[in-house]
Amino acid sequence: MQQPNIVHSHNIKIFACRGSKVLAQKIALALGLELGQSDVTVFSDGEFQPIYLESIRGNNVFIVQSTFPPLDNLFELLLMIDAAKRASAHRVIAVMPYFGWARQDRKDRPRVSIGAKLVANLLSAAGCDRIMTADLHADQIQGFFDFPVDHVYASSVFLPYLRNMQIDNLSLAAPDMGAAKRVNAYSRVLGCPMIICHKSRERANVVGSMTAIGDVEGRNVVIIDDMVDTAGTLTKAANMLMEKGAKSVRALATHAVLSGPAYHNIANSALAELIVTDTIPLRVPEGADASKIKVISISDIFADIIEKVYNYKSISTSFVF
C-alpha cells in the first residue's frame, strides 16, 4: 500500500485498547504514525480504568478496538471514548473492525433485546463522533447511529486473494440464506456460479438439516460468510458439499470469533482451508489444531479509510461493493 498523505500529523493520534493492540499497531504503521501511549489500571476486584499518557487536546483521536467477548472489550472502548472527550479531544472515532452484538439487530421473537441498537446508544452516550467497522452482520445496523458510520468490506482483501489462487471450476457458496446477498456480490465480480446452502436450526449455534441449491458436482467451492463462531454451520455445509460431489471446499470469513468447539469442528471437517482477517486476534486453545486457518490482515483498508476521513476525502472509491 502506498503510504497515505497524513498532513498535520500532530492533530491525529491512533490509540489501541488491549483487545486489538496488534491490529492497531499495523494500522498506525501503514499511516506512518506511532501508536499513541495509553495504559489501563486494573483494580483487585476486576474494575479497570484506561488513561491516556499523552495530551490529546484538540486532536482527532482514533481508538481501535473490536468488541468480541468478553464484555470488557466493549466497556474498555466506552471508557476510552469518555476519557478522550473529557481530555478535550476534537473528534473521537471508534475503529471497531468487529462490531460485537450485531446478531441482535431485530426482535426475532417476543421479549428479547436489540443488542446492536443498545451498543449504538452506548457509543453515542460515551461521546463517540463516528465509527468505522467491517462487514456488519446486518447492513441496517448503520441506521441505529445518529452519526457517520464507515462500513468497510473485507472483499477488498478477499477478492484479490481468490483471483491469485486461480481456482478452476470455481463456485461460491452461501452457508445460509442470510449470506446470499454477500455471496451474490462476489459471484458477480468474479463471474462464477453461486450455490446456496439451506439450513434449519434446532436452536442457537446448533444446525439441524442442510441441503444445497445449485450445481455442486465437480466444482471447487468457496464458502463466504461474515463470521465463524462455533463453525457448526460452516463445517456442516463443507461436509455436505463434499458428499454432493464437490472437488474441494474452502471458506472465507471476515470475523474469526471461533468459540466453543470451533477449532475441533474445523480441523475435523472437509474444509481444505479457512481464510479469515485479523479483525479478531486468533485465540488458539492449548492443544487445538489451527493448521487449516490462514489470516489475512485488514489493516491497510482501515489505514486508507482513516487517512481519507481525516483529510475530508471521498471514501466511496475504497469500497469494492
Image (cartoon, rainbow, N blue to C red):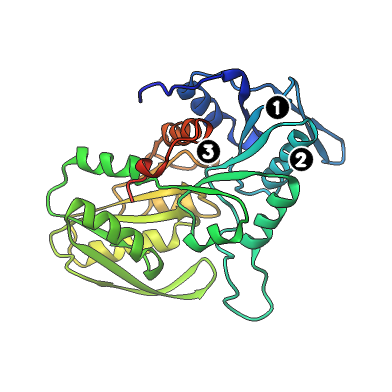
Percent position (x, y) of residue 31? 48, 23
Q: CA distance from mark 3 to mark 1?
A: 31 Å
Check the image and name the residue furthest to the bottom. Answer: 110
Between residue 48 and residue 207, name the one nearer to us.
48
Q: Earlier in the sequence, mark 1 or mark 2?
A: 1
The residue labelled by disc 1 is 58
Identity, as a three-letter code, of the amino acid under mark 2: Asp
Residue 50 is marked as: none
Foreground mark, 3 or 2, reads 2
* Dot 3 crowding, Cα within 10 Å, few <14, some 14–19, many 20+: some
Percent position (x, y) of residue 73? 67, 43
Determine the image quadrant of residue 198.
bottom left
Is 302 rendered above or below residue 261? above
Relative side of 313 to 162, left or right: right
Is 61 rendered above or below residue 33? below
Q: Residue at x 31, y 56 (%)?
A: 223
Secondary-structure class at tag 3: loop
Determine the image quadrant of residue 319.
top left
Check the image and name the residue furthest to the front. Answer: 312
Residue 281 is marked as: 3
Between residue 50 and residue 140, name the one nearer to us.
140
Relative side of 252 to 241, left or right: right
The residue labelled by disc 2 is 82
Relative side of 107 to 252, left or right: right
Secondary-structure class at tag 2: helix
